[in-house]
Structures are given as C-alpha cells and as structure tokens.
Amino acid sequence: KNEVEQSPQNLTAQEGEFITINCSYSVGISALHWLQQHPGGGIVSLFMLSSGKKKHGRLIATINIQEKHSSLHITASHPRDSAVYICAVRSLGGGADGLTFGKGTHLIIQP
Amino acid sequence: DGGITQSPKYLFRKEGQNVTLSCEQNLNHDAMYWYRQDPGQGLRLIYYSQIVNDFQKGDIAEGYSVSREKKESFPLTVTSAQKNPTAFYLCASSISGLAGQRFNEQFFGPGTRLTVL
C-alpha cells in the first residue's frame, strides 16, 4: 500500500510570499493529484499530473517520478489561498479502487 | 450546472440508528466513491463503484453499505455496526474508474458532516 507523506503539516506565511508544499510517496504511481479543501469542507481538484510540471494561474505543480516526490508552489500568495492542501496518488496497478491521500497541509496566509 | 451534490450538509443521529447519506452526480460519470475524513487523518476509501449495479469495498467498509441502482446516485448507509460513525463524509466521481489516468480525475461533492449523539 502506498504511503503518502506531506510536509509541512502546518504553514503560516505573509501575503505575497512564495509557498512550497511537498509530497512524497512510497510506491510507483500512475497519477498524482493536488486538492484544495476550504474550511467548509468541500474539495476542489487543482491538478492531476503524472510527469513534469503544470501551471494554473499562481499555482504550479511539479513531479519527479524517479524520486517519488511532488511539490505544489503558490506564487504571490494571498489570504484567499488559506486552505488545506491535500496530495493524493493512484498507485500503479491500483485499478479503480480510489486514491491514497496524504494528511494535508494547513496553509494560512496572513494579510 | 454539472456537479456532485451531497445532502444534507449536517446530519445528527442517535447512537444505534442507521442513517443514509445522499450523493448525486449529473456529470454522467461511471465511477463513484465514498470517503471518510477524520481530524488529522487523510481521506480513507469506504466503498467505490465502477458501474451501475456493481460496487466494491474500500479500506474501511465495515459498518457501511451502499447501492448503485442508478448511474447518478450512490447512497451510503452508516449502520449501527459502525463503531465510530461521527466523521466528515465525502462523495466523489470520475469519468471512469478503470486504470488509465486520463479519466481518473475525481470530482468531489461538498461533504456531509455526520454527528452521532
């Protein structure tokens, strides 16, 4: 079973700072997801990637398959970015049995 | 608008009672999933369904039951056999549940917070 570790668990930063959240996993994957969960609980999918890098607005996600590691970056952070960011992976050969999730990184951006 | 709806947002039940959580999607997705979230833990898979009239147990299926009679609906019943049912429950769907990552992106509902008194 894949083990997904995220760091840091909690992160508080000032508005405008560059943010990096890390995710590592133990077993080969077919895809990695970055998700955002707001205080109300609903989850939004930010990225799904299996190689390289993706960018959407101020968010950038990278993955290194050899090192089994992914990072989520936020440029010019803003208080509205405050949320829990969750990394999730689909293991190779994992079929249709869902994703394995990290515990999340609780991000607070202070104005 | 297309999406996933879960109702209600908050649910309170007495210990020993069965309760059913609703999940509906109008995305025409084949696969649907139920996850449970507890404080300080990652989401854990309860049940999943790749197609109508078929479903499989996830990692923590004990004390739960599901049905998939319609493509758009995947209700979860929390039975009295579930020892610690108070949690946040999330439903998700994807175009296909089969391997092939292009179709595996999961879309999540807003969740139901169940409290058993």
Image (cartoon, coloured by chain):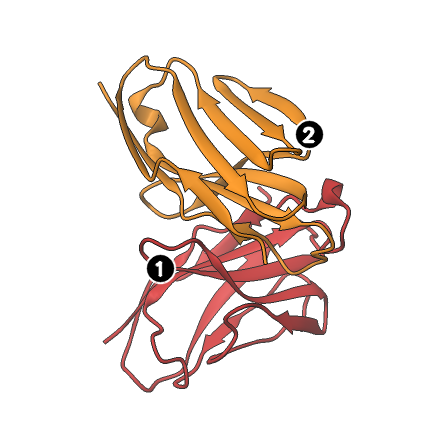
Tell me which residue sits at (69%, 56%) in the image: A94
Asked if badges 2 and 1 are on one and the same chain, I answer: no
Specify the quadrant of the image occupied by residue B98: bottom right
| Mark drawn on residue B108 | none
Q: Choose between B81 and B115: the one closer to the eye.
A: B81
Please rate how many residues cluster around mark 1, counting C-alpha atoms within 10 Å: few if below 14, some from 14 to 19, many from 20: few
Q: Is residue B69 above or below residue A89?
A: below
- Number of labels in the image equals 2
Residue A74: % across, % down: 43, 21
The residue positioned 40% from the left and 82% from the top of the image is B18
Q: Nearer the viewer, mark 2 or mark 1?
A: 2
Q: Secondary structure at mark 2?
A: loop
Q: Is residue A46 left or right of residue A95?
A: left
Q: Residue at x 60, y 37 (%)?
A: A68
Please name the residue that numbered disc 2 is placed on.
Answer: A51
User: What amino acid type should be assigned to the residue bearing mark 2?
Assistant: Ser
Shown colour of chain B: red
- Residue of label 1: B38
Q: Is residue B60 left or right of residue B101?
A: left
- In the picture, which chain is orange? A
